[in-house]
Amino acid sequence: MRKELLTVALLAAMVFNQGCNSKKEEAKEETKKPLSLIVVEPGHFHAALVQKSMYDDVDSVVHVYATEGPDVKAYLDKVEKYNSAPENPTHWKEEVYTGADFMDKMLAEKKGNVVVLAGNNQKKTDYIKRSVDAKLNVLADKPMAIDAAGFDKLKEAFESAKKNNVLLYDIMTERYEITNTLQRELAALPEIFGELQKGTPESPAVMKESVHHYFKYISGEPLVRPTWFFDVKQQGEGMVDVTTHLVDLVQWSAFPDVALDYQKDIELISAKRTATQLTPSQFKLVTKSETFPDFLKKDVKDTILNVYSNGEMNYKLKGVNAKVSVLWKFQAPEGTGDTHYSIMKGSKSNLVVRQGAEQKYKPVLYIETKDKSKAYEDAVAAAFKTVQDKHPGVELKKIAAGWEISIPAKYDTGHESHFAQVANKYMEYLKAGKLPEWEVPNMIAKYWLTTEALKRAK
């Protein structure tokens, strides 16, 4: 009897243990996330900003492949700072491989399924192509191509991504800045905006201007830029770098959800480039480097470094005249920062974003109109309700020129938060297994325009 009881107890224990083990396995399966990040050669602080937040579908273990040096160290330091933040700390676990063969090692091991690229742009297009060829999804910082040869390779990468059923996407953070979002939404309301005008090359219907600064604070600390950032052969000229955002906004807001064909829909009218000059002391302040490295000597004249970071282009998009321009300065005056100006001209009103002293260097959106009639005012108030339904708390504030859009502080989340918004949107697309139909042709159109404008300007 005792023997039988022991046998029954032993069998019960075995069944219980099996049950526990299977529950543990189930729990393990439940917590296994579908997406896993591979960060390759993170030379730009944007790589770390993608990891300022955690994501529901992304594994906390991140596999990093890079050459050893200050770039990867700066990236790891920022991620560690986010992990130890007093509020909303992240919990990334970084598994790092450093070596000259980092790319080959990454492709051989394939320890994740989403490659994040934000660094030296000279080889970025090649890294994109090799990653999608290996059937890996790619989320890349802009620009994805910095010259005509890069554009040709990028086109091949999109074809390869399609064939291999993976998604290649660039990080267009400016779409998530609230004034840009609202400008696009208002332009789609004919009761307020009317129709987008054609404009002329001298007076374009759509203009985007951006002023950036080399020395700035990121996550509360002075940004140290790598020395290669100032070499246009490695970073790319201003014409193909920041203008990527501006060209994207023109396409996205003027022709929302429309697939563009760069060979039919875009006509480049003119392009020009100029240099920003940096003294040795300014260069040292922003890079911590005592001297200009050899690869920059070609751009140094009378001890001054000339960086071709400024550019502007005039073009037609589906017959609409547009202009984008970018200017880099060394440092913004105290209490100010990067600035943005944007105008879209409609038959009933102009939608204008200003960010100057009057706006306390915060972007402010205006509806500027010549029609002061009661009927038009009523039509604007009625149409604006669709915007308020989508963005509760946003209000119209009457001014002499028309209206200022009053936006609650909760929508001003700051540039750094937009990286998580882009990443979350990309993850939605990964879950769906496809990008919106217009995204790939419009990325191709964008990079054709920027690289073609550079060719023209030179």
Image (cartoon, helix red, strand yellow):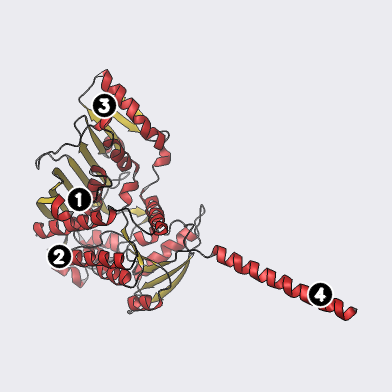
Indicate the amino acid at tag 4: Ala
Residue 362 appears in the figure? no
Instruction: Kindly give the residue lying farthest to the top in the view shown.
Output: 374
Earlier sequence position, callout 1 versus callout 4: 4
- Label 3 or label 4, whichever lies nearer to me, is 4
What separation in Å lies between label 2 and label 3 (alpha carbons)? 49 Å
Q: Do the residues labelled 2 and 3 touch (CB within 8 Å)?
A: no
Indicate the amino acid at tag 1: Val
* Residue found at x 38% / y 47%: 414
Q: Which label number is shown at residue 12?
A: none
Instruction: Classify 111 as above or below 340.
Output: below
Q: Which type of secondary structure does the marked residue at label 2 adopt?
A: strand
Earlier sequence position, callout 2 versus callout 4: 4
Residue occupied by mark 2: 300
Q: Which type of secondary structure does the marked residue at label 4 adopt?
A: helix
What separation in Å lies between label 3 and label 1 (alpha carbons)? 28 Å
Indicate the amino acid at tag 3: Gly
The local crowd at label 3, few if under 14, some if 14 to 19, many if 20 or more residues have their Cα within 10 Å, is some
Instruction: Classify 72 as above or below 223.
Output: below
Indicate the amino acid at tag 2: Val
Q: Which label number is shown at residue 402?
A: 3
Residue occupied by mark 4: 9
* Residue found at x 28% / y 37%: 188
The local crowd at label 4, few if under 14, some if 14 to 19, many if 20 or more residues have their Cα within 10 Å, is few
The C terminus, quarter of image: bottom left
Earlier sequence position, callout 2 versus callout 1: 2
Earlier sequence position, callout 3 versus callout 4: 4
Residue occupied by mark 1: 326
The local crowd at label 2, few if under 14, some if 14 to 19, many if 20 or more residues have their Cα within 10 Å, is some
What separation in Å lies between label 2 and label 4 (alpha carbons)? 84 Å
Residue 63 appears in the figure? yes
